[in-house]
Amino acid sequence: MTATVPGRTPAAAPARERAAAPDLAPQELRILVAVEEEKGFTAAATRLDTTQSAVSHAVRACERKLGAVLFERGRHGARPTAAGTRAVAYARRILRLLEAMGPEVRGAAAGGAAGAVTGPLRIAAFRSVAAHLLPPVLARLTARHPGLTPRVRIVREIGRGTAGEVADGRADLGLATLDAGGPPAVPGLVAVRLFEEAYALAHPLGHPAPHGLPLVDWDENCGSYTRDWWDRQDWIPPATIDVEDDTVAVSLVSQGLGMAIMPRTALLGAPPGLAVTDLGPRPPSRHVGYVTTAELAGTAAVRALIRELRELALPEGLTAA
């Protein structure tokens, strides 16, 4: 057995030893996930009802098998290395497939009968879609499959967004903004467009010249789908108020504090005092769809959710892909 020297990667182990190393066991995968999420070996041991030495031994065994240092140890706990981040993402995805195996097998044994789709279903979605479009989808889904337990996490569409949650194994399916015609923002995922939504001008009701109002903006607003259009407009001023949440932007506009350029889903259920005006014959738009992994796309729970998403009745301003 090759000892692990601090500061030296186990990748220096002989190739024969690494190739002959056994696969990681499910409990080892759970330990990697717990250490990453709890940010330390002791906290991971408490979560898993085991000892710190057992966790430390398991992590060293995983590093030996994989040929890479997975965590940086220090006085402040354990932080995943780049290799560790990748390993934990795979660990979550593998554990999710193991969790799905039972319901999948029992469903197959039942011949795919109605109600046979059971178990948890983890969904990541950005706020406006989760608030306005997901509820009727989940209502139909759970009515048809009472054994399903959806879990919805709200994730900001900044950086890797909901796609990152899927890639990292934290979600089975993500509702995401997708670049038109381009690959998924996170490589290795299955991405399918559901609809396109136009942007519109939100402004105080009855204002005679909304284009002259100060701009209220929010962090998720400008992406590749709006940037070119935005750059061509000479009437849009720099943002006077910048907020993190689209509901706050809408509320500020309805109180007369400015105007905002926002996607239609963010304007659904707008408060009194808000007016919505089209941005002309060729407004900016963004594509919204779902992302999942190739392996989870074939599971009964994800397939059932996708069917309901495709049957969604779209509000005005949204066009099916």
Image (cartoon, helix red, strand yellow):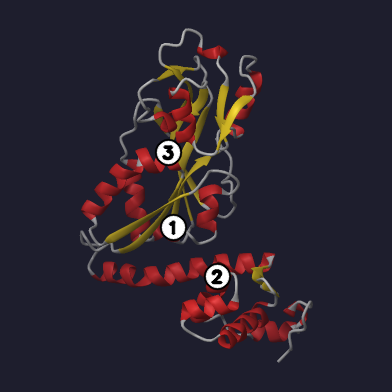
**Label 2: element kind:** helix
The percent position of residue 221, horizontal first and vertical second, equals 55, 33
Q: Earlier in the sequence, mark 3 or mark 1?
A: 3
- 1 or 2: mark nearer the eye: 2
**Label 1: element kind:** loop
The answer to whether 318 is drawn above or below residue 124 in the figure is above
The answer to whether 135 is drawn above or below residue 17 in the figure is above
Marks 1 and 2 close (CB-CB < 8 Å): no
- 3 or 1: mark nearer the eye: 3
Residue sitting nearer the eye, 222 or 250: 250
Going by the numbered disc 1, the residue's amino acid type is Asp
Tell me, for residue 172, which label it has, or none. 1
The percent position of residue 75, horizontal first and vertical second, equals 69, 74
Tell me, for residue 128, which label it has, or none. 3
Tell me the quarter of the image containing the C terminus. top left
Q: Earlier in the sequence, mark 2 or mark 3?
A: 2
The quarter holding residue 76 reads bottom right
Horizontally, is 317 left or right of 214 in the view?
left
Say which residue appears at 25% left-offset and 53% top-offset. Answer: 142
Q: Residues within 10 Å of mark 2 (few under 14, many from 20)?
A: some
In this view, the residue farthest toward the top is 208
- 2 or 3: mark nearer the eye: 2
Report the residue marked by disc 2: 38
Q: Residues within 10 Å of mark 1 (few under 14, many from 20)?
A: many
Q: Residues within 10 Å of mark 3 (few under 14, many from 20)?
A: some
Going by the numbered disc 2, the residue's amino acid type is Glu
Going by the numbered disc 3, the residue's amino acid type is Ser
Q: Earlier in the sequence, mark 1 or mark 2?
A: 2
Horizontally, is 260 left or right of 234 in the view?
left
Say which residue appears at 52% left-offset and 55% top-offset. Answer: 165
Residue 263 visible: no
